[in-house]
Amino acid sequence: MKLLVGTIVLLALLLPSRSSADSISCDRGIVSSGDRAGDLLVKCGEPEWRDSRTEEIVERFGVETKRTTTVTVEDWTYNFGPYQFMRIVTLRNGVVSEVRTGQYGAPKDRGPAPPECGGRVISTGDTKADVLIRCGEPFVTTSHQEELKERLVGGSRTVIVTVEEWTYNFGPQRFMRIITFRNGTVIDVRTGGYGR
């Protein structure tokens, strides 16, 4: 009987809780969806990386009626070191809307990133922070806006998103790597020509 109870307790502890998906636990408290940026700064301090973009949402409610909303979206990445996963907190207009788990973090006293920026190291779904840890700063960056359209019951919705390309140049003996992000998340990794 004790073995059965112990097994049940162990399984309950191992299963991820729902709150871990929408909250972050820091030295000075827990921050959850709906909390403000000030709460996040007080409880967790400054993030290691901040990324900001603007999303424009156009909702149509018929031929002559539309509503345009501009939202400032920020991703704050907290690096807790190489033995813990990074946490990415998304804020929409200064309010926490999502908390995601990234890859393992990097040591605080790390040197320059190793040039191991290959397809096996970076994959779809990684964040900018994941790429920076594994690849360092890119050689060239470009960005543009894309329009995504959705049909809704009784209307439609258009969202303007940011698409960025980061190019890594590893010298004349190696191919360049081109990483494409949509709203801060890797959507494509491809090989370019030889570097210089």
Image (cartoon, helix red, strand yellow):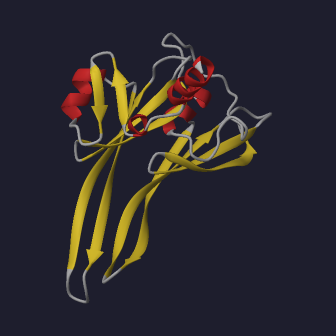
- The x and y percentages for residue 156 are 34, 78
Q: Is residue 178 above or below residue 117?
A: below
Q: Residue sitting at 57 percent across and 36 percent down?
A: 139
Mark yes or no: residue 45 visible.
Answer: no
Q: Position of residue 131 (x, y in %)?
A: 57, 35
Give the answer, above or below, for where 127 lies relative to 87. below
| Residue 33 placement: quadrant | top left
Badge count:
0
When asked about the image quadrant of residue 110, the answer is: top right
* Percent x, y of residue 73: 31, 47
Seen at 23% across and 63% down, the residue is 69
Q: Residue at x 57, y 20 (%)?
A: 6
User: Between residues 3 and 62, which one lies in front from this camera angle?
Assistant: 3
Q: Outermost residue, right direction?
A: 173
Q: Work out whether 196 lies above or below 179.
A: above
Q: Where does the N terminus fall, quadrant-wise?
A: top right
Front in this rendered view, residue 90 or 49? 90
Residue extending furthest toward the front: 1
Residue placed furthest toward the bottom: 63
The residue at the point 60 percent across, 42 percent down is: 167
Q: In this view, does 194 lie above or below 12?
A: below
Q: In this view, does 87 lie to the left or right of 54?
A: right
- Tell me, yes or no, if residue 125 can be seen here: yes
Quadrant for residue 96, please give it.
top left
For the C terminus, which image quadrant?
top right
Q: In this view, does 188 lie to the left or right of 25?
A: right
